[in-house]
Image (spheres, coloured by chain):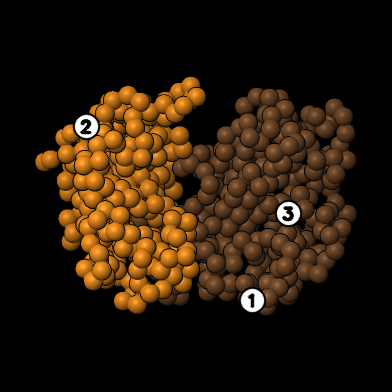
Chain colours: A brown, B orange
Amino acid sequence: MSPRDRAGAPDATAPLLEVEGLSVTSRDGVTLVDDVSFRLAPGERLSLIGESGSGKSLTSFALTGLLADGLSASGSIRLDGVQVVGARERELVPLRGRVASTVFQEPLTALDPLMRLGRQVAEPLRRHLGLRGDALRRAVLDALSEVGLPEPERIARAYSWEISGGQRQRVAIAAALACRPRLLIADEPTTALDVTVQAEVLALIERLVDEREMALLFVSHDLAVVSRMAQRALVLRGGRVVEEAGIDRILTSPQSAYTAELVRSARELDAALEVR
Amino acid sequence: MTAILELREAGLTYRRASTPALDDVSFVIEQGRGLGIVGESGAGKTTALSLLLGLARPTSGTVLFDGVPLDLRDREQLRAFRRSVQPVFQDPYSSLDPRQSVGRIVAEPLASLGIARGAQAAERVRRALEAVALPADAARRYPHEFSGGQRQRIAIARAIVSRPRVLLADEPVSALDVTTRIQIIELLGELARSEGMTVVMVSHDLSVVASLCADTVVLRGGRLVEAGPTSEVLGSPRDPYTRRLLASVPRLPA
């Protein structure tokens, strides 16, 4: 039986995520995200592109109600039909991991250093799918081997500080995807990794998103990475959307001066690699 | 070509470590030929840099400065060395003392190396700030008043104020946004040309090294994998690891 069973069949045409006029404000009244709107259909791959201070990460945190204390969201976020803005924590818990899951830049922040990795992958499986005992243990090992970790039994018994950065990000992905969410939010998931490890983790995310027909919201500052991972992108700057278009269009005919500068810089660095 | 700095069969094993952080590595930094030291975590890049900066002593092999083994106890040699070789660090947020004015920060090497004082020092600071394209009033302001890219310009101004022959930069643009990154790369390239400085940098970013450095050294697990002109090492790499490194760099569609 598919663990994706839900009350009522999902409507394939309805957006999975609908963000309308989202703003994020700090306690002292500074607007950090300003009137951001976008939609994401089931199975679609969208990217939020921006530099530091663009509000891309805050936007992605707001989607599942993960904003830090002192930050508040206004506007509307409908995730699988549920209004996230202003929702109570207990209304959001069923969404996280089940409808949408987030993978963060630094896997150490997502993983508890005092808890064995297996238990951390088991947590969402127990909570959302009600698995126990042998079934739970099997599901944990399956989740770990699906993200390409060798010796899943050993990893399950290990702590986060006992494995490499790339392996940690694989475990974080395993935990995020254990309950087969329909949307993966990846916030700079490979920025902290070495370039060869980045290539492997990007390939892993691509494969899993493909196989499970998940939607992907990929947050990144790196145009080259984005061009590989998404079909469409929102370019953010200073909390506002400066442009939304298909990746090809952004790369070939950017509409705003800022996007054009971003693309020019990325092209310049890319061209430097054409050494003869 | 004359070698300013050289690692000769240099190795460093940290106290209580079972394996060396750097193992039998040799390469030469020649006047006017920028060098990029590339590799991933644990490659030994930072260790190589601290040997080249005279911040650590090799546990095997030698560091040579102007052809002479570098002896950190030789005060005379060390003074000449510090005047010739200046560092630029990765994080412009933590490498600048927030309590000091930019003018004082930039003037620091002039005072500590006994190069210039008073009006003469102020003039050198003015010219250094001008060379990195910071506004003339920057000297009176404080680091927190500047953006990340501007702070890296301040750090570079401090490094060039003593007119060193070599700038040793540790991931000088990794902490910067891509649009700022391009500007700092251009600035370093310009300084290399106009001031005749040799820029040596440690970087995990191959495109930054390809933009700036005539020569490239690839390290992995403390050992030298491949070294030579950048056009050869990155243009037609011989070692399978260098090839894998290059193939892993995300590229824009044409």
Q: Residues within 10 Å of mark 2 (few under 14, many from 20)?
A: some
Residue at 30%, 32% in the rendered image: B226
Q: Chain of mark 1?
A: A
Amino acid under disc 1:
Val
Front in this rendered view, residue B224 or A175: B224
Quarter of the rendering containing residue A231? bottom right
Assign the C terminus of chain A to one quadrant of the image. top left
Q: Is residue A7 visible?
A: yes
Residue A121 position (above or below residue A9):
above
Q: Is residue B118 left or right of residue B146?
A: left
- Percent across and percent down for residue A180 are 74, 45
User: For the residues marked 1 and 3, what is the alpha-carbon distance in whole angstroms?
Assistant: 28 Å
Q: Kindly identify which residue carries mark 3.
A: A100
Assign the N terminus of chain A to one quadrant of the image. top right
Residue at 36%, 59% in the rendered image: B155
Q: Kindly identify which residue carries mark 1.
A: A30
Secondary element at image label 3: strand
Q: Residues within 10 Å of mark 1 (few under 14, many from 20)?
A: few
Quarter of the rendering containing residue B127? bottom left
Q: Are marks 3 and 2 in contact (CB under 8 Å)?
A: no
Amino acid under disc 2:
Pro
Amino acid under disc 3:
Ala
Q: Which mark is residue B69?
A: 2
Q: Is residue B6 visible?
A: no
Q: Residues within 10 Å of mark 3 (few under 14, many from 20)?
A: many
Residue B110 position (above or below residue B28):
below
User: For the residues marked 1 and 2, what is the alpha-carbon distance in whole angstroms?
Assistant: 57 Å
Whether labels 3 and 2 share one chain: no
Residue A87 position (above or below residue B16):
below
